[in-house]
Image (spheres, rainbow, N blue to C red):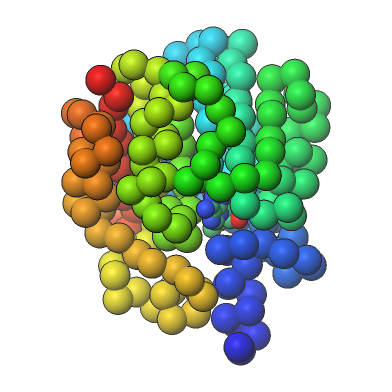
């Protein structure tokens, strides 16, 4: 594996020193996509929210800022990501912010718990997407929304050559997978250069 590939494979599962660097980088460089995507969801005060594949925890912080008296949960497969997300949200950790290690296909939360679930730049790496989407649907409250944000939407993208295990799904395909999992009022939004946000609502 080349150096570039090694570095970018830390997007899929951040580990060690390179993982730490990548998490720091992603916390900053995913801000424009995340802020645009979150603007599309009318976030209200006192919401309970979950960010899956939370990486270095910047989305958790952004969610918290948009909802007064909220509770924000984060989950990530990587130990390094969990540590960074906890550090970035240390001031409110275990009071308003709760971060655990785990995977999208087996969410350790009760049914109908969240008003909003977000997934920023992460579904490319999830195993068994239909199972994961069923899990998201299960943990959402009725009327709750799921927002998937992506920067890579071309299936033959240069990224899939350098990031091990990355699968790019066209936004329209994700929309139809959300419908298969029971989501309604599904929407796909695009913004230049290559941003997409796919939103579904639990009925
Ligand atoms: C490209 S990073 C994005 C991190 C963060 N969402 C952001 O926008 O900066 C992808 C993250 O998804 C996590 N991840 C990959 N597969 C996962 C899975 N099946 N369940 C939960 N997290 C996963 C990785 O460990 C990594 O932290």
Residue at 44% of width from left, 68% of height from top? Answer: 166
Q: Can residue 82 be seen in this view?
A: yes
Image quadrant in which the C terminus is located = top left
Residue at 80% of width from left, 32% of height from top? Answer: 90
Q: Is residue 184 above or below residue 6?
A: above
Left or right? Give the position of 139 relative to 200.
right
Q: Where is residue 100 in the image (x, y as percent from the top left)?
A: 68, 38
Between residues 194 and 76, which one lies in front from this camera angle? Answer: 76
Instruction: Choose top left, top right, bottom left or bottom right for residue 124.
Output: bottom left
Between residues 84 and 100, which one lies in front from this camera angle? Answer: 100
Residue at 60% of width from left, 26% of height from top? Answer: 72
Q: Is residue 134 above or below residue 174?
A: above
Between residues 113 and 22, which one lies in front from this camera angle? Answer: 113
Q: Position of residue 110 (x, y in %)?
A: 53, 22
Instruction: Choose top left, top right, bottom left or bottom right for residue 40.
Output: top left
Left or right? Give the position of 155 relative to 94.
left
Q: Position of residue 181 (x, y in %)?
A: 27, 38
Q: Is residue 193 above or below residue 92?
A: below
Left or right? Give the position of 172 relative to 148.
left
């Amino acid at each position: 594996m080349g150096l570039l590939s090694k570095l970018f494979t830390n997007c899929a599962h951040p580990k060690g020193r390179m993982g730490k660097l990548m998490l720091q980088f992603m916390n900053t460089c995913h801000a424009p996509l995340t802020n645009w995507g979150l603007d599309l969801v009318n976030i209200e005060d006192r919401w309970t929210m979950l960010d899956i594949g939370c990486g270095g925890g910047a989305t958790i912080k952004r969610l918290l800022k948009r909802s007064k008296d909220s509770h924000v949960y984060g989950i990530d497969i990587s130990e390094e990501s969990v540590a960074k997300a906890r550090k970035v949200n240390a001031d409110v950790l275990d009071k308003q912010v709760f971060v655990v290690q785990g995977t999208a296909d087996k969410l350790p939360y009760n049914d109908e718990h969240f008003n909003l679930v977000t997934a920023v730049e992460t579904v490319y790496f999830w195993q068994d997407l239909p199972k994961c989407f069923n899990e998201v649907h299960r943990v959402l409250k009725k009327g709750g929304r799921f927002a998937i944000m992506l920067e890579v939407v071309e299936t033959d993208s240069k990224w899939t050559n350098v990031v091990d295990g990355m699968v790019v799904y066209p936004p329209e395909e994700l929309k139809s997978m959300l419908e298969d999992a029971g989501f309604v009022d599904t929407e796909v939004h695009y913004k230049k250069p290559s941003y997409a946000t796919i939103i579904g609502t639990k009925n």
